[in-house]
Amino acid sequence: MKGAVLPRPAADAGADAWHDYVYLRDNPRGAYEEYWHHTSGCRRWLVVSRDTATHEVYACQDAADAKAVRA
Amino acid sequence: MRYSALSIFLNGLFGNRNWAAHWRQPEPKPHYDVIIVGGGGHGLATAYYLSKTFGIRNIAVLEKGYLGSGNVGRNTTIIRSNYLLPGNNPFYEFSMKLWEGLEQDFNFNAMVSQRGVLNLFHSDAQRDAYTRRGNAMRLHGVDADLLDRAAVRSMLPFFDYDNARFPIQGGLLQRRGGTVRHDAVAWGYARGADAHGVDIIQNCEVTGIRREGGKAVGVETTRGFIGCGKLALAAAGNSSRVAQMADLKLPMESHVLQAFVSEGLKPFIDGVVTFGAGHFYVSQSDKGGLVFGGDIDGYNSYAQRGNLATVEHVTEAGKAMIPALSRIRVLRSWGGIMDMSMDGSPIIDRVHLDNLYLNSGWCYGGFKATPASGYCFAHLIARDEPHETARAFRLDRFRRGYVIDEKGQGAQPNLH
Ligand SMILES: Cc1cc2nc3c(=O)[nH]c(=O)nc-3n(C[C@H](O)[C@H](O)[C@H](O)COP(=O)(O)OP(=O)(O)OC[C@H]3O[C@@H](n4cnc5c(N)ncnc54)[C@H](O)[C@@H]3O)c2cc1C
Ligand SMILES: [Zn+2]
């Protein structure tokens, strides 16, 4: 598990944007998207859509295909 | 009523029918000088010290469930002050000193048991790291002893000393560490706070924070609006959700940590022991059950229950340390929601509104911190000045680059 799927700021986006990206989290109770690494299988990075209150998994796709990484 | 040997004797004579309730069940008043959100160990301790030591009387603690329903009643009860970093060590040692006098102070038996906490090491590199931590502790006036393999073996002969991958080479022992009965901590602080006039209001969930002109003026709750002079948040695993009610985004993720208890056994393990080659810690309760746990599950969760992969992982680490564990039946397991901060260290600070205070980020080590956390948070709320042992726990340390990362893991909450 790597954590929340967040859009990476541009290198020159400034301290506020980077502080937000590195440290701050919405940490919702409910629907959530996060990166998982399939370590003991195909070793692909995945985007998993999950509910943090019920642990239900809604969807899972290869991170390379996940164009619609949530903004 | 004060508890004493005499009061137990006299009440026993009359069939124990005359004990009074530990605390009142008051209706919420329209306004309090201080409202504390969260009736866990930290919220209750804060109320206790605010009323007893800092002389503020008109206080309410609002708890969405019943007292002790959160992490204070779910943890593995370990207390210790064996930290490395200067921001942490004096704070946890202050907490240990408060534990040492707590039962006399709040006149309640919390079963504080300084039975020792032993961290095992399994390699030369780990011995070096533990030596360094032990020296840092001693420099701060905290007790620490480095034990060699023979000394550990004489204490705990039935461990797997010659494990092919993780031979036990020795351990770092803090003799003043130990365990405390966690429910009794919540009850003792609640009873003490109530005696000093604090209203403890259960089944009262905070659902919104009302603001006017840069101040919090009160909270919306499932029992109506309640006004406040100052607002203090101590919601542990739900911190992000409560802070969000004031549009504050925290450097935090909520994660589930599981714990386990075995069937009752004859005396087996005297103190608290941790396995250094994986994450596993165990102690034996006074009823005889082995109380143990390991890592958090690793994914964000608000579910208060974990998954089987972690159960396997924890018990495998346990068995690598104590082969005899394979014959023991586990009676129960449960989970709690941890406020995992981005550097693994807590936050005790005044935040973006003038009268809003935050106590959070306790990860899976906040039980031992309960007395000092309550004391330091009360100090901050009453005086608007941080307590000297809690000065490093600022919210803006992430922005300023002053993280307190005991494990050196970086901004990855599931690794702290
Ligand atoms: C399995 C497990 C093992 C652990 N082992 C140890 C250990 O051995 N040693 C150690 O030092 N620490 C340990 N911990 C960590 C420790 O238990 C916590 O860090 C600590 O209890 C957190 O502070 P608290 O007691 O105030 O939390 P809690 O008891 O969780 O209190 C927070 C309270 O806030 C309430 N709340 C939340 N949202 C709202 C709202 N909107 N309105 C009103 N109330 C609200 C909750 O219901 C809860 O009662 C462990 C934790 C777990 C789960
Ligand atoms: Zn795969």
Image (spheres, coloured by chain):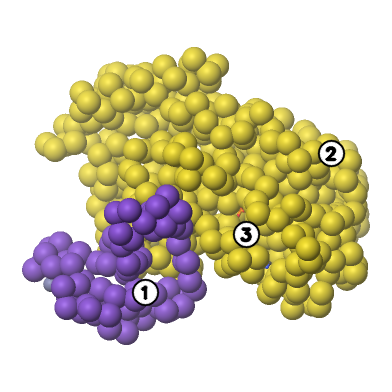
Residue visible at 27% across and 80% down? A68
Letter of the yellow chain: B
- Position of residue B386 in the picture relative to residue B362 (left or right): right
Q: Is residue A54 above or below residue B140?
A: below
Q: Amino acid at mark 1?
A: Ala
Residue visible at 80% across and 55% down? B230
Q: Is residue A35 visible?
A: yes
Q: Secondary structure at mark 1?
A: loop
Q: Which residue is mark 2?
A: B54
- Location of residue A42 in the rendering, given as x and y in whole percent from the top left corner: 8, 68
Q: Amino acid at mark 3?
A: Ala
Q: Which residue is mark 1?
A: A71
Q: Secondary structure at mark 3?
A: loop
Pointer 3 residue Cβ closer than 8 Å to ligand 1: yes
Cα gap from disc 3 to disc 1, whole angstroms: 28 Å
Q: Is residue B16 above or below residue B223?
A: above
- Location of residue B256 in the rendering, given as x and y in whole percent from the top left corner: 43, 62
Q: Which residue is mark 3?
A: B235
